[in-house]
């Protein structure tokens, strides 16, 4: 494919999935810097695989690209440990309960970035995009029971990963 | 635990995307597309180069911090015609105070928030602690007397020595008086009253300043709002916003959290450099012609002969960062590798030129700067000039030599720049 054709296709795909990427990547990162980095990796992935984004499986590829990008962004974050440090004491005093919730949410996000491919997709579709099981089954190309199973396994894996992060 | 996770996931799923994230996504996406469109070789690492920029975010944040050393200096104009006296007559002289500042820098590469806490004393000097994502990244100490500031960078176990002039130290000390900030905002009747509101439970009244000279050291174009407590006449919040690098960088600063006369001690202002810290850089930031030339030369060394397109701190910060990334790539070095002392000094020294330029603007010295078109190869072209007497100008040429010329001679010299 010529460079100009790739560019044209890239722009088409970018426009089609911009709302999806904005929403999913923000929910996966919850942090402007991480979001920017994940977005950059996603765009790079889309550009590298743009030929594959022209068919029926484009949506599935975009999911994979976005989740891989999110994982890379989390791995790369400053300090390499992915820990969220809360704001400086005295700058934004918050009740400890709220801080605990914010930190736990960040840990959940970090744990999602480490899920296996299918489990990650299942969590994103079920909770971040709020799809029902028939829709998830269709997207994952499996039965409704299979979709439930992926989500359930993903929740169990998240629980284990959060326990490890505690 | 599982229920708890589900609840958190549902909450994440219900989150709305903030407006500024929409903007970041749009800018990131557009910038990426532009990068692609500009390359003729589709699989060349131009995209990787772009991506790598975000990996040096910590270094970039440190550069922003150090570049903003002079925040509080030269932001405002000092020219006469002050009409503020009645408002401030009953304000007690404040010897010490603490305030915080949140700075947000948005560029096509993303957004960075830096939190700072300033400790100020007319007797002991100024200290500024800077935090990036909650982590302490630097502590700057500028004494009330003497001419040397120190900035500690704990993550690198290093420190920067910065030389100031006596006048600069004096200016920093003078800025310790919050009335000076109010005075400068209210200077020359060039402000607009923007009414009253409540901030943190305090009734405040505000003014806005928005003219071409405002914030020239920091931004290409900026404006500011000052909110003063109605019952104490003390500042409650200062908001500064501006653009640089041709509008591609947006900066917002919120200064608030003022704690007046908090009882600071001498020990709060002593850097006490730990014995295992090493020197990161020794920088002459005095606003002398020598420091200016050294700063411009240092920039040109990093930027392969180019100069900053504009001499406000934020434009310079962005351009030195971009130039450093390009240099590292050319050298085949990792961006995560610590810059050498020489590289740090080259990157930091340009601040002296920014200060010098800001002062010339402030003093109305008919200053002009042509860094957007002149390079170090242009030995016969005017890079910068300003008035030194009624009919004489001092000129820095592209090769960084200096000369004094008459008004007519300057016109002749500038022809080559104007013709470009």
Image: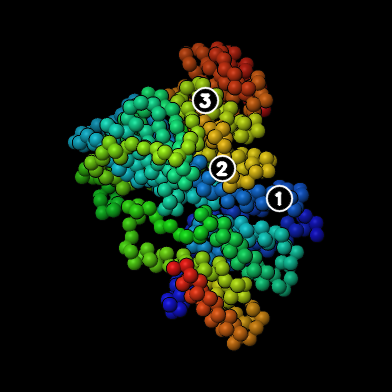
- Can you give x and y, in whole percent of width and height, for residue B242 in the image? 47, 42
Q: CA distance from mark 1 to mark 3?
A: 35 Å
Q: Quadrant of residue A58?
A: bottom right
Q: Secondary structure at mark 1?
A: loop
**How many numbered badges does the structure rendering display?**
3
Label located before the other in sequence (1 or 3): 1
Residues indicated by labels 1 and 2 sit on the same polypeptide chain: yes
Residue pointed to by mark 1 = B45
* Left or right, residue B414 beside residue A89: right
Q: Residue at x 41, y 34 (%)?
A: B150
Distance between mark 1 and mark 2 Cα atoms: 22 Å
The residue that label 3 is drawn on is B292
Name the residue: 34% across, 31% down: B143
The residue depicted at 50 percent of the width and 36 percent of the height is B280
Q: Residue B260, can we see it?
A: yes
Q: Chain of mark 3?
A: B
User: Residue A80 location in percent, x, y?
Assistant: 53, 57
- Camera-side residue of B228 and B115: B115
Q: For the view shown, which residue lies furthest in the front direction?
A: B275
Q: Residues within 10 Å of mark 2 (few under 14, many from 20)?
A: few
Q: Quadrant of residue B8?
A: bottom left
Where residue A60 sits in the image (x, y, percent)? 66, 72
Residue B338, label in figure: 2
A165 relative to B135, above or below: below
Q: Which subunit holds the residue at mark 1? A: B
Residues B230 and B327: in front is B327
Q: CA distance from mark 2 to mark 3?
A: 25 Å
Q: Is residue A53 above or below residue B102?
A: below
Dot 2 or dot 3: first in sequence order is 3
The answer to whether tags 1 and 3 share a subunit is: yes
Report x, y in % for residue B226: 34, 42
Do badges 2 and 3 share one subunit?
Answer: yes
């Amino acid at each position: 494919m010529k460079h100009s054709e790739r560019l044209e296709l890239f722009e088409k795909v970018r426009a089609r999935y911009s709302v999806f990427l904005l929403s999913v990547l923000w929910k996966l990162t919850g942090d402007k810097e991480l979001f920017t980095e994940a977005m950059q990796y996603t765009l790079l992935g889309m550009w590298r695989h743009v030929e594959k984004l022209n068919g029926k499986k484009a949506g599935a590829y975009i999911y994979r690209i976005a989740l891989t990008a999110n994982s890379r962004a989390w791995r790369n974050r400053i300090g390499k440990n992915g820990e969220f440090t809360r704001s400086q004491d005295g700058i934004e005093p918050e009740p400890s309960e709220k801080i605990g919730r914010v930190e736990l949410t960040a840990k959940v996000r970090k744990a999602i970035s480490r899920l296996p491919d299918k489990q990650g997709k299942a969590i994103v579709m079920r909770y971040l995009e709020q799809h029902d099981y028939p829709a998830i089954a269709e997207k994952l190309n499996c039965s409704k029971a299979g979709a439930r199973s992926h989500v359930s396994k993903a929740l169990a894996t998240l629980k284990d990963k959060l326990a490890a992060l505690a | 635990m599982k229920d708890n996770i589900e609840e958190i996931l549902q909450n994440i799923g219900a989150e709305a995307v903030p407006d500024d994230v929409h903007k970041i996504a749009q800018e990131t996406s557009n910038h990426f597309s532009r990068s692609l469109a500009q390359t003729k070789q589709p699989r060349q690492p131009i995209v990787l180069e772009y991506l790598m920029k975000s990996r040096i975010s910590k270094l970039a944040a440190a550069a922003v911090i150090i570049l903003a050393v002079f925040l509080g200096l030269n932001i405002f104009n000092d020219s006469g015609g002050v009409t503020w006296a009645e408002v401030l007559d009953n304000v007690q002289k404040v010897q010490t105070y603490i305030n915080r500042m949140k700075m947000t820098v948005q560029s096509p590469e993303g957004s960075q928030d830096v939190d700072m806490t300033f400790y100020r004393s007319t007797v002991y000097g100024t200290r500024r602690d800077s935090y990036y994502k909650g982590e302490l990244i630097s502590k700057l100490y500028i004494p009330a007397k003497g001419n040397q500031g120190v900035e500690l960078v704990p993550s690198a176990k290093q420190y920067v020595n910065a030389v100031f002039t006596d006048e600069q130290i004096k200016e920093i000390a003078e800025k310790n008086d919050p009335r000076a900030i109010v005075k400068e905002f209210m200077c020359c009747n060039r402000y607009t009253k923007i009414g009253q509101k409540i901030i943190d439970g305090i009734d405040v009244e505000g003014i806005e300043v928005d003219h071409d000279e405002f914030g020239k050291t920091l931004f290409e174009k900026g404006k500011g709002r000052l909110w003063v407590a109605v019952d104490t006449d003390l500042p409650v919040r200062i908001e500064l916003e501006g653009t640089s690098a041709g509008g591609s960088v947006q900066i917002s600063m919120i200064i608030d959290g003022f704690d007046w006369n908090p009882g600071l001690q001498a020990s709060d202002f002593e850097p006490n450099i730990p014995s295992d810290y090493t020197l990161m850089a020794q920088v002459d930031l005095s606003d002398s012609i020598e420091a200016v030339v050294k700063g411009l030369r240092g920039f040109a060394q990093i930027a392969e002969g180019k100069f900053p397109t504009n001499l406000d701190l934020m434009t310079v910060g962005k351009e030195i960062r971009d130039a450093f990334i390009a240099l590292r790539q050319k050298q085949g070095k990792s961006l995560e590798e610590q810059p050498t002392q020489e590289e740090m000094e080259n990157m930091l020294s340009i601040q002296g030129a920014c200060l010098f330029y800001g002062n010339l603007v402030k003093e109305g010295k008919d200053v002009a700067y042509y860094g957007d078109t002149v390079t170090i190869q242009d030995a016969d072209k005017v890079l910068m000039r300003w008035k030194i007497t009624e009919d004489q100008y001092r000129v820095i040429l592209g090769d960084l030599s200096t000369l004094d010329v008459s008004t007519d001679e300057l016109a002749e010299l500038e022809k080559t720049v104007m013709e470009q």
